[in-house]
Amino acid sequence: MSGTLQADLLLTNARVRTLGGPDHSVTASSVAVLGGRVVALEGVPARRVVDLDGAVVVPGFHDAHNHMAWHGLALAEVDLRVPSLDHLYEAVAARAATLGPDEWVVGSGYDENKIGAHPDRDALDRAAGGRRVWLKHTSGHMCVVSSAVLADLGLADAPVDVPGGLVVVGEGGRPTGLLQEQAQSLLSRLVLPYPVATLVDAIERAGRAYLAEGITSVVEAGVGGGWIGKSPVEVAAYQAARDADRLPVRVELMVAADVLHPVPAHEADGMPLGLDLGIRTGLGDDRLRLGPVKVFSDGSLIGHTCALTEDFADTPGSRGYLQGDADALRTRILDAHRSGWRVAAHAIGDAAIDLVLDAYAEAQRRWPRPDVRHRVEHFGVARPDQVARAAALGVVPVPQGRFVGEIGDGMLRALGPERAGWAYRGRSLLDAGIVVPGSSDRPVVDGRPLLGIHDLVNRTTEGGRPLGREEAMTGLEALTAYTLGSAYASHQEHERGQVLPGRLADLAVLSDDPATVDPSRIRDIEVLRTVLGGRLVHG
C-alpha cells in the first residue's frame, strides 16, 4: 500500500475472519476501510481507529430469503408465538379491548403444531367481541379469520373453490375460518394494498432490528403481487425508504410472478413475459436492486400443503398440492427465463422440486444462458437424486437451517424418521459442490443469523430431538453460508461476503468466533457492532 494512504476507519486488535483462501480460513488482525470498501488488512494510518479488544470481525450477515416488509408489519401486530390456544385467545381479547368496534385485530406467528390446533372462528368471535380478526400462520401459507371477515367475503355459511388453495370447512360444510394458500388472496380486497407510508415504516422498523443482529444485506422474497405482496407499488415503498435514508440495509427485491405480463417487444427480442419497459433482474445498485422473479409451486411443510411424492407421515392419504396447474407453472418459469429473469421458485415438497428442476433444465436447453443461477427457495424435502441434479444444473438451493431449531418438531411429525434427513439439507449440498446460502424466511421463524448458524451446526429441534444430524455443517461452513454463500446466490460474491481489499466494508463485530466456539454456544454469541459501507450503524 502507498505510504500516503489514510483510511477512514481502522479496526484493530481484532480476530478477523476474512473468509478468504480456498477453504475460507484466512484470518487477520485488523481491517482498514476507505470510501466504503476494505482497502487493507494490515495496519495503515486512519482518521478513526477503533480498538476491538480481541473481538471477532466477520463479513456482515446476508439473509438470502426473508420478508422484510412482512416482518416489519408483524412487529406491530399481536404476537401469536404463544404456548396454547387459550393464550392465543387471551392475546386476541387483550388487543380487542384497546380497539374500536370497527377496527381489526391482526396477529401473526401462530403454529398449530405448538398450540394443538388452528384457532376457530367462533372462539375468535367471543374473544374479539365480534370484531374482524385476521391471524396469520407462522409459515405465511395460511391464516384464520373471524365470522365478520367471512361474512365480508361471502363465506359465512359455505366455501368457494379456489385454484391452488382451500377454504377449510368443518362438520356440515361450514367454513372454520382457516384459509390455505391461494385462498388467502380472497382477503386482498379487504386488506390490500397497504399505503406506501405504512410500508416505509415497516421497512425501517425491520431494518433497524436487522442491524442489531449483524445483518447488512437481505433478499426480500416477493413483492408486488400474489398473497405475498403488500402493494402493487411495493417497489416504490423501498425507493421511498431509500430516498428518506430509512432503508437501513442493502436489499434485493424478488418480484412476485403474478405481476409479470406479456410485453409488446419485437418477436426477435425473445421477451414474452416481463414488466413494462423490459425491466428485469439486475436493475439497481448495491443498495437496492431487482433480483429474481418469485414463482410459488407449492406450500408449507408444517402446514401440510407442500407437494410430496409420498403421503405425509402423520396424515395418511394426503400429499399436499401444487399452487397451480403444473403446465402453467412450467410455462411461467420458461417464459421468465427466456425474458432474462433469474427465477427463484418456491418448492418445498419433492414433487414440486421435480417440477421446478425439470423446468430449469428445459429452459437452459432451449435458451442457454451462462451462469444464470436459478434458485429453489427452501428445497425443503429433497431426495438424494434431486441434490445431485441441482448440482449438475448449477441451481442454487436456498434452505433454511433455522427451521430445524424452531419448527423442526412439526417437520419430524410430517415426514417421519425415514425422510427426516431430507429436510432442509446442508452437508449433502456442500458435498455435491453446491454453494449454500444462509437464510431464515423471517418472520416464519426468529431470523437472527447466529441462531441460524447454530441450527446449521447442531441440527436439534426445539424439543431436543435430532433432525438429520448427518446434514450438519461445521461452524466455519455455516458462517460462510450466511455471508459468502448468500452473496453468491445473489451474484454478488465479488462485492460482499468476504473481508478482503476491494469488497464492500459491511462487517459484523462479534463477542466470539462461530467457527471455533463450542457448537452449543453459537446461539449465545453477541453482536457488538455492525458496519455498513464503512459506517458504524450499530453498537
Image: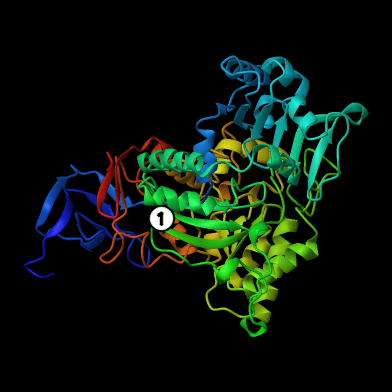
Q: Say whether residue 290 is left or right of residue 21.
A: right
Residue 157 visible (yes or no):
yes
Local SS, label 1? helix
In this view, the residue in front, 519 or 366, is 366
Front-lying residue, 475 or 101: 101
Q: Residue at x 51, y 30 (%)?
A: 76
Q: Neighbour class for label 1 at 10 Å: few (<14), some, many (≥20)?
A: many
Q: Nearer the viewer, residue 214 or 246?
A: 246
| Relative image position of residue 14 (x, y in whole percent) | 21, 49
Classify 373 as above or below 45. below
Quadrant of the rendering where the C terminus is positioned? top left
Task: Give the amino acid type for the residue marked by disc 1 in the picture.
Answer: Thr
Q: How many marks?
A: 1
Residue 478 seen in this snapshot: no
Q: Which residue appears at 72% of the width and 41% of the height?
A: 184
- Residue beneath the point at 48% across and 44% down: 452
Q: Where does the image place residue 523, in percent across and percent down from the top left?
A: 42, 37
In percent of width and height, residue 412 lies at 67, 40
**Percent coordinates x, y for residue 437 in the rendering:** 49, 57
Which quadrant of the figure has residue 98?
A: top right
**Image coloring type:** rainbow
Which quarter of the picture shows residue 52?
A: top left
Task: Relative to 254, say whether 126 is above or below.
Answer: above
Which residue is situated farthest in the left direction here?
3
Considering every residue shown, the one lying at the far bottom of the view is: 268
Q: Which residue is mark 1?
A: 483
Measuring 46% from the left and 61% from the top, which residue is drawn there? 289
Q: Is residue 42 left or right of residue 472?
A: left
Quadrant the N terminus occupies: bottom left
